[in-house]
Structures are given as C-alpha cells and as structure tokens.
Image: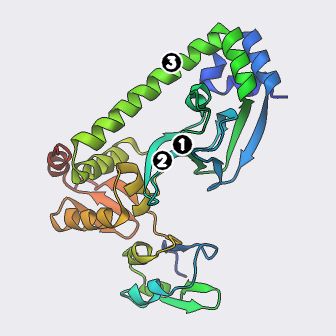
Amino acid sequence: MIQLEDLNKIPILSSLEEKTKNAFAERTYRHKLHAGSTLLIEGDPADACYFIASGHFRVLHMNPEGRIQVLARLTPGSPINLISLLNQEKVNLGTVEALTTANVLVLSAYDFEFLLSHFLDFSKTLLFVFAERLKNMTQLAAELSLYTVKARLARFLMDLADTRQIFDNWTQDEIAAQIGTVRDVVGRLLREFENQGFIKRDRHQILLLDRKGLTEIANQIT
Amino acid sequence: MMNKLLPKIDLNRCDRCGVCITACPENALLLTDHGPIINAPHLCTYCTTCEEVCPQKAIRTPLTVVWAPIN
C-alpha cells in the first residue's frame, strides 16, 4: 500500500483531507517506468489514471503519417489520463511517454469513479487541474493557429533559455514535435537564424545572441 | 583524452542503411557489422547532419539553448 508520506510529496494530493488520502492510498499502487517507455497508447481503452510520483513525461498526438505534436510535458505531481476516463468513449486521448526514469501511482478507472463520487475534495482538486489544462490547451491552440512556424521556433528558443527548463537536451525532432512542424524545417530555420546573426551554434549549444531580433520574429503572425 | 559531446547512436533502432556514413561531411563515421560508430571523434563537429538524415531516428544530437553571455 502507498504510504501517506508519499502522497504528501505530491502537491495536488497533499492538500486532500486525511480520510481522502487514506482512501486514495488504499486504492493505488506504484509502477516504475524506464526512460523512453510508453505508459499509454492513444486509442487504447482507458482503464486507469496515474499520478506522477517522480520523473517526467510527454503527452503526444500522432497523425496517420507519423507526424507528432507534443500536447504537454508533465512533471512530478501531475495526473495523467483523467480526461480520457471522464470521456464517454473511454479511450486514451493521447500517447504518453516517459522522458526519464519515472514512478507513477496507478488508480483504476473503477476506483477513480469511486473517489470522484465519494470525496468532494478529490473532485474539486481535479477541477483545478482541468482548469489549468484547459488554459494550456487554449494557449497551444492559439500558438499553432496564430503564429508562423518561424515565430513559434523563436518563441520556443527564448522560452527555453529564459526558464532554464529541466529538459535542456533537445533534438531537432523533439523541437519540431513541440512547435508543430517537422525536423527538416527546424534544421532549415536554425541555419537561417544563424545566418542572420540571431543565434550561434557551438557544438551542442545554441547561443541566443539577439533578443530584440528574435522577439520581432516571435511576434510574426500567420 | 577526448571529452567532447558526440552524437548518440541507438543501435537497436539502426537498420544499417549507411545514409549517415555518406552524409557525414567530416567522414567521422564508419559502418560496422553492428551499425555505425564514430570512428574519428576528433573530426566530428556536431553539425547534426547525421541526425537529420537518419530515416530510423536512431541518432540523437541533443542541443542546449542558452542566452549568450553579455560581454
């Protein structure tokens, strides 16, 4: 059984009432994943949700040609697959991959329903999660529809450099999946940025040189 | 002793097509029975061409993004 101390380390669960935590702990178990392994496959039946105890994940959607769009990157504490369980079709709405070695707490669909209907604080906590997810998806939709690929790449590079993210090792393929394009385009645009003096490549580092210039590009709308 | 970052090759994904070998502008790669290896690491400039051409996405050249230090 999961210990209460473990739940207290997960921010969205730590604020639950003691009886809710006990009910949650009785119904969950721990599952370990290695970096690169797949937790969920889009379209498969949704039979559980997960709470990240440690590690990082990405949620992605793949079109029939194999092109990937990353929908979200999830950090410790984040729940996974809640919306799929509440959706009437009960299928996984995205594929979820572990980016690092990770541990999740697994809660079956049946027990999820039980907790939702018996523990108001659990339901309210998840509502806040949904609100945050909806906000993020709205921002993503706006990014993809309002800005050019070049603008999205400039925004992405500046965001990475400004926030010093944990995932600081990005391949061009991963950058492409994040900004909704393909690897070739990312490679071409990085060369273009370099030729224009906005960035400099120094082996594995992309050095951003010109914030004003990159900001102007970042505001180019479609 | 060389201690510079080099492309990472996943031999489990590699189908030994050899595209990376011919694409490498520095001739730093060699195709062996087990797949490509970085035979001449001192020649590798980390230009990321090998990653770009690999049809199996078996080569990773991760990048870190930082602001350039202000002089």
Q: Residue at horizontal 30%, vertical 43%?
A: A144
Q: Residue A222: x percent and y percent? A: 17, 45
Q: Residue at horizontal 79%, vertical 16%?
A: A22
* Label 3 element class: helix
User: CB under 8 Å between callouts 1 and 2?
Assistant: yes
Categorize mark 3 by other alpha carbons within 10 Å: few (<14), some (14-19), many (20+): few
- The mark that comes first in sequence, 1 or 2, is 2
Of badges 2 and 3, nearer the viewer stands 2
Up/down of A186 relative to B36, above or below: above
List the residue tagged with mark 2: A61
- The mark that comes first in sequence, 2 or 3, is 2
List the residue tagged with mark 3: A128
Q: Are marks 1 and 3 on the same chain?
A: yes
- The amino acid pointed to by label 3 is Phe
Left-right relation of A199 to B62: left
Q: Residue at horizontal 80%, vertical 28%?
A: A2
Q: Residue at horizontal 58%, vertical 27%?
A: A88
Up/down of A146 relative to B12, above or below: above
In the rendered image, the quadrant that contains the N terminus of chain A is top right
- The amino acid pointed to by label 1 is Gly
Q: CA distance from mark 1 to mark 2?
A: 5 Å
Q: Are marks 2 and 3 on the same chain?
A: yes
List the residue tagged with mark 1: A94
